[in-house]
Image (cartoon, grey):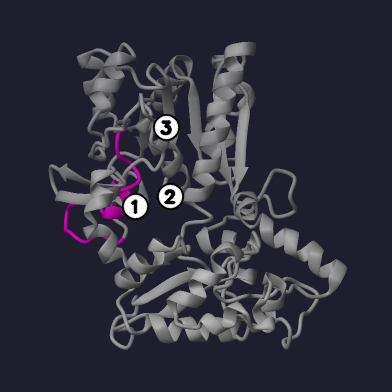
Amino acid sequence: MTKPLDGIRIIDFTHVQAGPACTQLLAWYGADVIKVERPGAGDVTRSQLRDIPGADALYFTMLNGNKRSLTLDTKTPEGKEVLEKMIKTSDVMVENFGPGALDRMGFSWKRIQELNPKMIMASVKGFSDGHSYEDLKVYENVAQCAGGAASTTGFWDGPPTVSAAALGDSNTGMHLAIGILTALMQREKTGRGQKVSCSMQDAVLNLCRVKLRDQQRLERVGVMQEYPQYPNGEFGDAVPRAGNASGGGQPGWIVKCKGWEKDPNAYMYVIVQAPVWEAVCKVIGREDWITDVRFASPMARLPHLMEIFAEIEKWTMTMTKFEVMDILNQYDIPCGPILSMKEIAEEPALRATGTVVEVDHPIRGKYLTVGNPIKMSDSPTEVTRSPLLGEHTDEILSELGYSTDDLIALRHDKVI
């Protein structure tokens, strides 16, 4: 069975996380992703946070599976010649260099178009082109702060908080992958390539659109009734932090479960939406609330949410989070256990679905990595290990027409 992107060749000039996450997704779909790396060094994440001496770090292995590695010094005339041949025979180039790096290398967008008019040039940016900060270097947490996530995350009496989820990095990579796939489809109609870019600030903001919604509501009415600050707290002129409130109009909160004193993840998220209100009251032994006028409607309940969740917590603290989940699921009450990364790593269901995959590496041995989160009935994803540095250099250059003698000369001149 062919894969969706069979026959698509991608020059991967990315490093660290945002770009590699993008190109790995495309590799999972069958694209031939050639990761171009510096001879002798490679992607900085090969050695970053290393846990086994001499082995590629997990940071690298978990973002670069299913790819081929080519070492190449693009600063030399011979290296530039190799890159020109690659551009002529490839479909997409993905990069997350600093601003102007490719131009200084001699491969401006104009030059790339001259070499291959069908080439799609995709870039990860910190801020969009034309932004006053477009030349600034951006990292994960900077993007979360600049994209509105940090200011709206955390509790109202504490500082802004960044998320452990890679909203700036991997999220931007996923957005860029959508742009690349769309450009490939458009190329089928026009025969032309184009530039595609996604800024980390924009990608974070796209995931924070409900907070932009709330900003406009706040400016119009002055309060937001579904936030924990209502009715007794104060609202300023910007969307505040709301703790564990859902933000989507369905009241939810994290409550303690049995063992919380020693287990920092013995918690459960519970949502008390209108269709299951009576079920919630019955499960926690507060049937009297069903006829209580203070709780007669979702709007009536809003000022009393903390009281409601405090009562729910008294009940959940008598059971483990999994026991609580089993009971609430019987009544279709939306809930979810707080799973630690250890629990996720050991969860059989995630292995069975290919969400967590064990891969064998020739140096570091077996390791866990994420699988493709997108499941397709006719295109199952096979996750393979990350490449060793320069593992496929000879193979790729031979495909470009270089002879054995050519490879010896390039290696002698430290081009590869």
Q: Is residue 399 above or below residue 99?
A: above
Residue, disc 2: 17
Q: Amino acid at mark 3?
A: Leu
| Principal secondary structure, stretch drawn in magenta | loop
Q: Nearer the viewer, mark 2 or mark 1?
A: 2
Highlighted magenta segment, given as a residue range? 49-67
Residue, disc 1: 45
Q: Which residue sits at x=25%, y=37%? A: 387
Q: In the figure, is residue 38 to the left or right of 408?
A: right
Q: Please give the label number shown on residue 26.
A: 3
Describe the element under mark 3 as helix, strand or loop. Answer: helix
**CA separation in Å, label 3 and label 2:** 14 Å
Q: Amino acid at mark 2?
A: Gln
Q: Which residue sits at x=35%, y=38%? A: 37
Q: Nearer the viewer, mark 3 or mark 1?
A: 3
Where residue 244 sits, quadrant-wise, is bottom right
Q: Is residue 75 visible?
A: no
